[in-house]
Image (tube, rainbow, N blue to C red):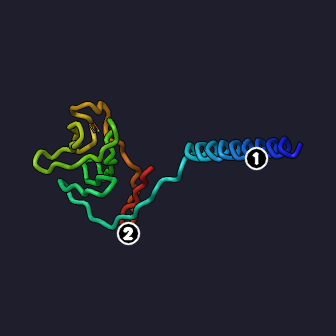
Amino acid sequence: MIIKKQRRWFIKALTGIWLGGLGAVGLITAFSYLPRPPKKIFLKVKLVPNKVIVGPEYFLLLSAHGPIALSRTCPHLGCTVNYDPEENIFICPCHQSRFTLLGRYISGPAHKDLKPLKLKHTDAGFVLEIA
Ligand code: FES
């Protein structure tokens, strides 16, 4: 009788632990799908034509239409895209996708443009939003 009660208690405890773990994994998964607020970066820089500012996650440059910011994340598989000053284009080191300075796709497996980033110009500098 006592062994039967202990076994029942043990099975209930194991089931509780298992369900608790399952619930925790479910909550973590649900939270990972919630939208996160964009990361804001303040940049106190002066943009000049034909000069690309290369940040850890962004390119910032002055185009003919004004200042633009582009994500450095390759639309193919997410490698960090580099600026090639000799060719004056952006090149992904992983599979050699190429993009114009406006972020337009030229060649390679990416088949998409670089993602533009929100950019606000203030009196003190630029505020960049990285989603
Ligand atoms: S990850 Fe950039 S081209 Fe493949």
Q: Residue at x 73, y 41 (%)?
A: 15
Dot 1 or dot 2: first in sequence order is 1
Q: Is residue 38 above or below residue 18?
A: below
35 left or right, relative to 2 = left
Q: Position of residue 28 (x, y in %)?
A: 60, 47
The residue carrying pointer 2 sits among few (fewer than 14), some (14 to 19) or many (20 or more) residues within 10 Å by Cα, namely few
Q: Residue at x 26, y 46 (%)?
A: 81
The residue carrying pointer 1 sits among few (fewer than 14), some (14 to 19) or many (20 or more) residues within 10 Å by Cα, namely few
Q: Amino acid at mark 1?
A: Ala
Q: Residue at x 65, y 47 (%)?
A: 24
- Quickly name the residue at label 1: 13
Q: CA distance from mark 1 to mark 2?
A: 60 Å
99 left or right, relative to 73 = left
Q: Which residue is more in the foreground, 44 or 7?
A: 7
Residue 74 falls in which quadrant of the image?
A: top left
Task: Give SS at disc 2.
Answer: loop
Residue 53 falls in which quadrant of the image?
A: bottom left
- Quickly name the residue at label 2: 124
Q: Which residue is more in the foreground, 12 or 20?
A: 12
